Each structure stands twice: as structure tokens, then as C-alpha cells.
Image: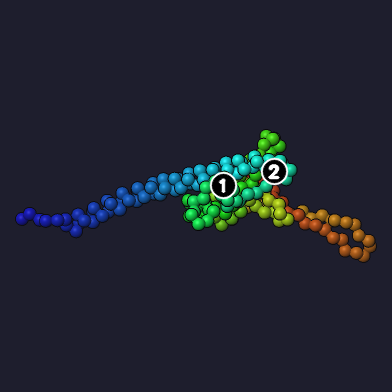
């Protein structure tokens, strides 16, 4: 007698084969998808930096006098230098997160090239993963910053692994007998190595 359909064993074999193929294909698809989003992010940042350079060349003397000046993505859009991706707000979106890009473009005068450069930076977050090419800003306090570029994909906290805080204390003035001397404390980054991040010099 001829049987119709599949037996339970045959169905299980088919399901196992499909599951095995999916286990092989899905990681590759996710890798390709992630790479495409990273490339889109890099292209957007490149366009933002080019726009900032275009604007920076119109105020080159001011940048040279101040060494560095910042401009936001929103300001570049409002000046008509780059285009917004939103109909209601002056925003460009990060394709890897879906959130608006909230960083600044730092335009600096570089004495070695006698020209300006532009770097899109965001405040460093020790709790997130950074990809090669991303640039971050670290505050020293008192309105001073250092800028770093990720040179190798880095797990959370790798910048603080490679650049550690050092504290320096010094006496500000001499005192008379019986008086308490006053001192100042300054903090700075001491590079341990640059495997994951390198400092952007200018």
C-alpha cells in the first residue's frame, strides 16, 4: 500500500537539516548586515567632516587664532552645508543605533600642514563597544579635552585601560610659620599603550 506524506522521522530529519543550515547562514548574514551599517555610518561621518572643512575654510583665520573651534551637526544643517535626514528636525541618524548623531565636529588649525582639519567626535562612553575609526572626546575638566581615534575594535572600557589618569600636586605659594600652605592638583592622561586608541594630535 502506497503511503501519503512524510513520516514523523522524515519530518524531524528535514527540521534538523533546516536548523543546521540556518545556524550556518545567519551569522554570516548578520556580519554582512553589520558591516553594511558600519560602512554607512563611516560615509555619513565622512560627509559631515567634509562639510565642516568647507565651512571651516570660510573662517580659517578665526580657527587659527583660537587653535580649535567646534560646530554641531545641527549647525551644519542649519547653515545649509549638509542635508538633514528628518523633515521636522535638523538631524542625521546613526545607522548602527538609529539615534541622531549628537557629537561635534572639532575644526583645528594644524601647524605642521598649515591647514585645518575636522574630526567628528562624541563624548567617550566607557560602557559601549567602539569600532575602528570612531573618534571620541575626553574631558579633563576646566574646559580642556583630549581627542582619541579608535585604531582597533575595542570592548567597553578599553580607552581607560590604555590611558590612565595621573595626579600631580604642587604648592602654589610659600607660607609664614604656623600657616597652612595651599596646593593645586592637576589631572592628566598618561599613555600606557595605543593598541586600541591613539591620540589625535591636531
Q: Residue at x 38, y 47 (%)?
A: 29
Q: Of helix, strand and loop, which one carries label 2?
A: helix
Can you name the residue that lies furthest to the bottom here?
Answer: 178
Q: Is residue 66 something that shows in the picture?
A: yes
Q: Residue at x 47, y 45 (%)?
A: 40
Residue at mark 1 = 80
Compared across the picture, whether 113 is left or right of 157 comes to: right
Q: Quadrant of the N terminus?
A: bottom left
Q: Residue at x 91, y 60 (%)?
A: 175
Q: Of helix, strand and loop, which one carries label 1?
A: loop
Rendering coords of residue 122 (x, y %): 59, 52
6 or 26, nearer to the observer: 26
Tell whether label 2 touches label 1 (CB within 8 Å).
Answer: no
Q: Is residue 201 something that shows in the picture?
A: no
Q: Quadrant of the C terminus?
A: top right
Say which quarter of the image contains residue 16: bottom left
Rendering coords of residue 141 (x, y %): 71, 56
Binning the other alpha carbons within 10 Å of mark 1 as few (below 14), some (14 to 19) or many (20 upward) gives few
Q: Residue at x 94, y 62 (%)?
A: 177
User: In front of the other: label 1 or label 2?
Assistant: 1
Dot label at residue 63: 2
Rendering coords of residue 149 (x, y %): 60, 45
Instruction: In the rendered view, tell whether residue 108 sits above or below residue 182.
Output: above
148 or 15, nearer to the observer: 148
Rendering coords of residue 35 (x, y %): 45, 45
User: In this figure, what is the number of numbered marks?
Assistant: 2
Of mark 1 and mark 2, the one earlier in the sequence is 2
Amino acid at each position: 500500500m502506497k503511503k501519503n506524506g512524510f513520516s514523523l522521522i522524515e519530518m524531524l530529519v528535514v527540521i534538523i537539516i533546516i536548523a543546521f543550515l540556518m545556524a550556518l547562514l545567519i551569522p554570516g548574514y548578520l556580519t554582512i548586515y553589520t558591516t553594511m551599517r558600519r560602512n554607512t555610518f563611516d560615509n555619513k561621518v565622512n560627509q559631515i567632516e567634509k562639510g565642516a572643512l568647507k565651512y571651516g575654510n570660510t573662517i580659517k583665520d578665526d580657527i587659527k587664532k583660537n587653535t580649535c573651534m567646534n560646530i554641531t551637526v545641527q549647525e551644519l544643517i542649519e547653515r545649509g552645508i549638509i542635508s538633514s535626514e528628518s523633515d521636522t528636525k535638523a538631524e542625521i541618524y546613526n545607522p548602527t543605533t538609529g539615534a541622531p548623531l549628537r557629537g561635534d565636529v572639532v575644526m583645528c588649525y594644524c601647524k605642521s600642514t598649515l591647514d585645518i582639519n575636522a574630526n567628528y567626535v562624541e563624548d567617550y562612553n566607557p560602557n559601549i563597544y567602539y569600532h575602528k575609526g570612531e573618534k571620541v572626546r575626553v574631558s579633563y575638566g576646566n574646559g580642556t579635552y583630549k581627542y582619541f581615534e579608535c585604531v582597533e575594535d575595542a570592548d567597553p572600557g578599553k580607552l581607560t585601560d590604555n590611558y590612565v589618569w595621573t595626579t600631580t600636586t604642587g604648592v602654589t605659594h610659600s607660607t609664614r610659620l604656623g600657616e597652612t600652605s595651599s596646593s593645586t592638583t592637576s589631572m592628566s592622561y598618561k599613555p600606557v599603550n595605543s593598541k586600541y586608541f591613539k591620540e589625535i594630535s591636531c
